[in-house]
Amino acid sequence: MVAQNFHFEYPLLLLALAIPFLLWWLPRTQLKEDNFEKLKPYADSHLLPYLITQNSLQQVTTKKAFINWAMLWVLSIIAMAGPRWDYHDVRVFKPATSLVILLDISKSMDSDDVRPSRLIRAKQEIEDFVSLAKQTNIGLIAFASIAHIVTPITEDHNTLIHLLPSLSTQLVKFKGSRIVNAISQTKKLLQSQPKENPKAILLITDGDFNENQLEKTIQSLQKENIRLYIMGIGTKDGSLIPGHNNNWMTDQSGKKIISQLNEAELENLATLGKGVYTTANYRDNDTHILLDAIEKNMPTNTIEKNPVRVWHERFYIPLFFIIPLLLYRFKQNSV
């Protein structure tokens, strides 16, 4: 079995094995001491020693050094050529869903009816979701009055997770949430994805918004086969919204604003978007509800037809012989 599968990754490097042979053969063409008498008719006697390349003692020393370096060269070339045998086939899972997460970072997300705060809890939910969504390309947009693309749609989930701590309501200059604008940015990202990939939006918000064109915008997603899934952050009782200088945010009349989770409205929006709504909690079932619903719409042929063959590399075997030879050379040079 090994003999049948054995081969080199870079076989052309083996041509370099001829170099030690050439170095061995060339000196054989030079003049030796036993030809000393034959040279007398052709050169003055005081010049003859310069025609002899090495004396007997030097030849012995040079021969040992040559053999050592030749072995080092041969083993190094074999290692670099990449000997390999045995393999295993790996089936590649092709991400089949393009998903954009819309994260609400408006001031109301600082409310603490969900501990430690709505925004921190939302980021924890995103981290849980991303760690489980192995077959999904994910992008992230943070929005309030303006939408900002945090990461494009990518397979690199680690980058997305590393950027989450930097998201804060402090990035928001103006009050309010404009989801319509965020959805428009999302559609641009999803349009760049392969047409055959299912496309989805995961909106994570407390529902503290009011836009006239919102329902119409969500209904328009169906024309592009984009589904909308929503995760609500907060409670029905709600909480005051922290403002500047440890004060609470107030309306125009000076009354403190209480931000409440509007589950009924969010459920309606999810229905319009042909998706699913769930409220964030401290268990794993909220994440699994959304993930199961999203993966339900994935095509069944998510596995590549042709598996990838991974060979077992054996380049390290010649290195076991190179190390003692190098130690021998260092010892000889130090003497």
Image (cartoon, helix red, strand yellow):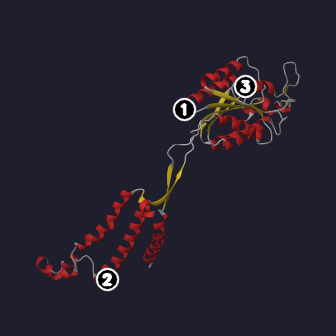
Calculate the distance from the C-alpha at mark 1 to the C-alpha at mark 3. Answer: 25 Å
Image coords of residue 328 (percent x, y): 45, 76
Asked whether the viewer can see residue 24, the reply is yes
Mark 2 / mark 3, whichever is N-terminal: 2
- Image quadrant of residue 173? top right
Image coords of residue 107 (percent x, y): 78, 29
Q: Are marks 2 and 1 in contact (CB under 8 Å)?
A: no
Mark 2 / mark 1, whichever is N-terminal: 2
Calculate the distance from the C-alpha at mark 2 to the C-alpha at mark 3. Answer: 94 Å
Is residue 262 toward the left or the right of residue 40 in the image? right
Kind of residue at badge 3: Thr
Kind of residue at badge 2: Leu
Q: Which mark is residue 271?
A: 3
Is residue 265 toward the left or the right of residue 156 in the image? right
Q: Which residue is the site of mark 2?
A: 57
Q: Which residue is the site of mark 1?
A: 194
Image coords of residue 30 (percent x, y): 22, 73
Query: Which-is-in-front pick, marks 2 and 3?
Result: 3
| Relative depth, front residue between 179 and 41 | 179
